[in-house]
Image: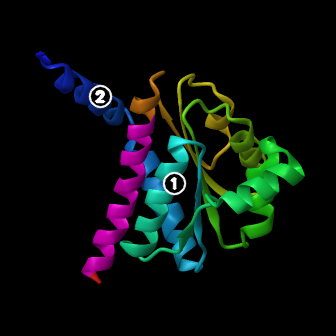
């Protein structure tokens, strides 16, 4: 079975999406994460499904490679406890209330930008002036895309394109800090 350049078309599609990410959003994210690090705060990263896996990977890399305190809420005990007590749509918001300190920030990921638990958490962050970066895709006017201090939107309706773009943006941010760490 021949592939006939389908793989190249696939990666070119993701490349095109990433070329449309505004550099100012990257720079603002670097500044926000730098401020959090200077304040000795922690970067929390949260998503559902594949986005939760991305959050875990990036959180470990921030801590290990970039030496920036980072964590996720990807603990089944935490998720099931908070979802049981507050409802699935509120568990992330309630985890933020329980874990975030005043110098911390959060990154929320939702491919569609409509995941109720992520949107409710973002609304809470906005209302309480918590530093927030959002990553979403699909509809440009999705609820999540307007709630962060910094909002990344990937213009695609394909989950893997959106998720891979989010992942690349986040690991790029890790690499920026890892390279700066090596220079010191």
Look at the image and tell me whether residue 173 can be seen.
yes
| Viewer-proximal residue among 118 and 143 | 118
Q: Quadrant of residue 19?
A: top left
Give the crowd class for mark 1: few <14, some 14-19, many >=20 residues within 10 Å.
Answer: many
Q: Residue at x 81, y 47 (%)?
A: 90
Magenta-colored segment: predominant secondary structure? helix
* Stretch of the chain drawn in magenta: 163-183
Q: Residue at x 44, y 33 (%)?
A: 162
Looking at the image, the residue that sits furthest to the front is 1
Q: Check residue 168 for magenta coloring.
A: yes
Q: Check residue 40 for magenta coloring.
A: no
Contact between marks 2 and 1 (CB within 8 A): the answer is no
Q: How are the colours assigned in the image?
A: rainbow
Look at the image and tell me whether residue 127 can be seen.
no
Q: Residue 166 location in percent, x, y?
A: 44, 42
Position of 37 relative to 176 (above/below) = below
Q: Is residue 153 left or right of residue 99?
A: left
Give the residue number, with chain letter if any, for mark 1: 55
Q: Quadrant of residue 103?
A: bottom right
- How far, Cα to Cα, is label 2 from label 1? 23 Å
Q: Which quadrant does the C terminus fall into?
A: bottom left
Give the residue number, with chain letter if any, for mark 2: 16
Query: Which callout, 2 or 1, points to the residue nearer the camera?
Result: 1
Q: Earlier in the sequence, mark 2 or mark 1?
A: 2
| Viewer-proximal residue among 174 and 37 | 174
| Viewer-proximal residue among 143 and 86 | 86
Helix, strand, or loop for circle 2?
helix
């Amino acid at each position: 079975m021949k592939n006939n350049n389908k793989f190249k078309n696939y990666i070119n599609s993701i490349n095109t999406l990433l070329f449309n990410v505004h550099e100012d959003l990257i720079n603002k994210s670097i500044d926000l994460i730098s401020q959090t690090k200077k304040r000795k705060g922690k970067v929390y990263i949260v998503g559902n499904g594949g986005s939760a896996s991305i959050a875990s990977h990036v959180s470990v890399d921030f801590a290990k490679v970039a030496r920036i305190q980072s964590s996720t809420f990807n603990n089944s005990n935490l998720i099931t406890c908070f979802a049981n007590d507050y409802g699935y749509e509120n568990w992330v918001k309630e985890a933020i209330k329980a874990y975030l300190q005043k110098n911390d920030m959060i990154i929320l990921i939702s491919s569609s930008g409509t995941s109720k638990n992520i949107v409710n958490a973002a609304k809470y962050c906005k209302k309480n002036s918590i530093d927030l970066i959002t990553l979403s895709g699909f509809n440009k006017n999705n609820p999540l895309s307007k709630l962060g201090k910094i909002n990344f939107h990937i213009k695609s309706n394909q989950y893997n394109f959106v998720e891979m773009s989010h992942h690349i943006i986040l690991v790029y941010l890790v690499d920026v800090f890892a390279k700066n760490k090596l220079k010191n």
